[in-house]
């Protein structure tokens, strides 16, 4: 059984969305009211993801809540690149984040924006 997916989460995995949609649409028993509401929110969200980032579901993409994208992108480079501590103070992180956002598209999940890698 998968878990309910809501727009309160900081990060959402594409795999989880697909699995949850599969579960909700193939149940042998009826959906309760909360599950119906979840399905009605997830269907347009998944459609928007597909329309804006081809292959998003097969690439195990992470959707990042708009309030977390700046920290996520900064931490991503700090975790993957060896930047001497002395030089970190000279990096314009705001500019770095804005440049990185070119590779992301915004999608909306029940009124909340998330960023999804589109390349």
Image (cartoon, helix red, strand yellow):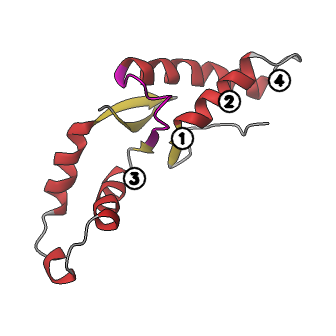
Nearest to N terminus: mark 1 or mark 2: 1
Which residues make up the magenta segment?
Answer: 52-63
Q: Which mark is residue 68?
A: 3
Q: Nearer the viewer, mark 1 or mark 3?
A: 1
What x and y, as percent, mark residue 4? 70, 37
Nearest to N terminus: mark 2 or mark 4: 2
What x and y, as percent, mark residue 68? 39, 53
Q: Is residue 51 above or below residue 103?
A: above
What x and y, as percent, mark residue 23? 74, 25
CA–CA distance in space, label 1 to label 4? 24 Å
CA–CA distance in space, label 3 to label 2? 23 Å
Q: Does the magenta segment cover residue 31?
A: no
- Residue drawn at x 50%, y 47% is 11
Q: Is residue 103 left or right of residue 51?
A: left
Q: Is residue 40 left or right of residue 66?
A: right
Q: Which residue is mark 4?
A: 32
Q: Look at the numbered disc 3 and give the secondary structure of its residue.
A: loop
Along the line of sight, the residue nearer the viewer: 55 or 45: 55
Label 2 neighbour load within 10 Å: few <14, some 14-19, many 20+: many
CA–CA distance in space, label 4 to label 3? 32 Å
Q: Is residue 20 above or below residue 48?
A: below
Q: Is residue 86 left or right of residue 46?
A: left
Q: Look at the numbered disc 2 and give the secondary structure of its residue.
A: helix
- The quarter holding residue 36 reads top right
Q: Which residue is mark 1?
A: 13
């Amino acid at each position: 059984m998968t878990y309910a997916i809501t727009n309160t989460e900081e990060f959402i995995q594409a795999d989880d969305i697909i699995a949850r949609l599969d579960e909700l649409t193939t149940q042998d028993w009826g959906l309760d009211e909360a599950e119906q509401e979840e399905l009605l929110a997830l269907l347009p969200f998944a459609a928007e993801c597909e329309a804006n980032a081809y292959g998003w579901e097969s690439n195990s993409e992470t959707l990042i809540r708009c309030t977390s994208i700046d920290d996520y992108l900064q931490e991503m480079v700090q975790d993957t690149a060896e930047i001497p501590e002395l030089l970190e103070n000279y990096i314009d992180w705001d500019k770095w984040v804005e440049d990185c956002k070119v590779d992301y598209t915004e999608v909306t999940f029940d009124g909340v924006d998330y960023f999804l890698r589109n390349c």
